[in-house]
Image: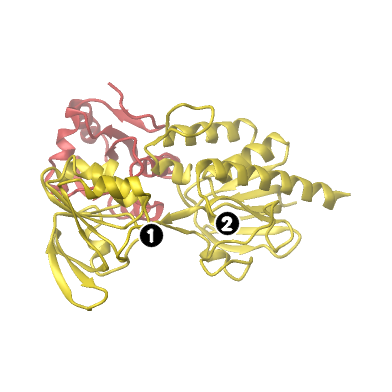
Chain colours: A yellow, B red
Amino acid sequence: MEKIYDVIILGAGAAGLSAGIYTSRGKLDTLILSEGVTGGQMVLTHEIANYPGVEMIKGYELADIMKRQAKSFGCTLRANVKIVDYRLTEKIKEVELEDGRIFRARTVILAPGGKPRSLNIPGEKEFEGRGISYCATCDADFFRDKKLIVVGGGNSALEEAVTLTHFASHVTIVHQFDHFQAFAHAVEEASFNPKISFIMGSELRAYEGNGTLQKVQIEHLKTGERTHLATDGVFVFIGYMPNTAPFKGLVGMNERGEILVDETMKTDLPGVFAAGDCVAKRYRQVTTAVSDGTIAALSAAEYIRTEQR
Amino acid sequence: MKYLRTNIREIETAAELQKIINENENVMVCCGRMGPMCIPVYEIMEELEEEYDNVKFYSMAFDSPESDMIRTAPECRGFMGLPFTMYYKDGKVAKATTSIQTMAQVKENLDQYLS
């Protein structure tokens, strides 16, 4: 007979790993399937200083600890898989991989997290790694004494722009609105930095170059005027979007594609729960993802107990 | 000296790198740091080690002076994103990529260049 897991968790970020720790420690047969890297957004975080009980830790180290914890309790983890189909409406749920393998479970916890938004403009694929970057920590030192553009107006954009001034000769921040969404202290720090200038109310329309990025096309949104700005690199920090496209039409979502859950992390499908950055909520932190994952795991366990009565 | 905390074997010296690519038909080396663009590639390599038993998988620290041969390789000219990932066939560079790669991209390169 085909194996039926108690729980399949889709995603191996903070929410998915936390859920896996709880379900497997609770003796539920648990499989974590992840289309991305184990650790999710945690891996993208250089250092985490506000995780209670841990004074300072690198994101990948915290992810590695969570992964080892989950495995130590018997959780099976498969990362970087390609999932092609989800059948979640029946009592036994099925997840099908690209290689034809089908995994079955009594409950599913959706924890696919989010991914950095890209601008999706001409030249993007051509110049990724050749001038376009999404990680200042990783790539800043390739741009020593060079001119850079940072796209975005949130905390990440402004804070990373300041960091980049330690390497670059000049940083131009391009933002679509005429005001910033970042906290006041971040705006103030960027505003007073002599190496930073601003182009507000504007968006990038194209990346251009020859082998490496050389300039961008910028459109002023009110006038529609398009100009070129020479640059050696562009760092894009325009937020994250939930990885929920595969679940559209399967579970209830809001207009932003975030999954709707109740306080027990239940979706509108029986036996299907959701946790982490994919759900509709105000705050997205490692701690809130851990909380979501814990609640989803306990709710899944309760659902299985109820169904077995 | 080891710099990287991964489950992929880390090459520590330039001499070791040269020996490995001379003595093995197919070699993939991910040259990076413990950063968000590099860790996913190490994890993908770790998962593919069993499937591609004809390929030797290694990591190497980008910041070590010993990795100069990769950093200055002509195939890496214009690269401005970590990691630099090298695919060696019969001692020569068959393909080099910059920045993060997906499982599908890595498999495509392994199939195309190191089959």
Q: Is residue A136 left or right of residue A287?
A: left
Name the outermost residue toward the bottom: A224
Q: Is residue A10 left or right of residue B63?
A: right
Closer to the camera in the image, A112 or A258? A258
List the residue tagged with mark 1.
A117
Does dot 2 land on a helix, a strand or a loop? loop
Q: Residues within 10 Å of mark 2 (few under 14, many from 20)?
A: many
Residue A95: x, y in percent? 62, 58
Looking at the picture, does residue A112 appear above or below residue B35?
below
Does dot 1 land on a helix, a strand or a loop? loop
Cα separation between marks 2 and 1: 17 Å
Q: Residues within 10 Å of mark 1 (few under 14, many from 20)?
A: some
Residue A254: x, y in percent? 57, 67
Q: Is residue A101 left or right of residue A298?
A: left
| Badge 1 amino acid | Arg
List the residue tagged with mark 2.
A279
Residue at position x 28%, y 62% in the image = A175
Q: Chain of mark 1?
A: A
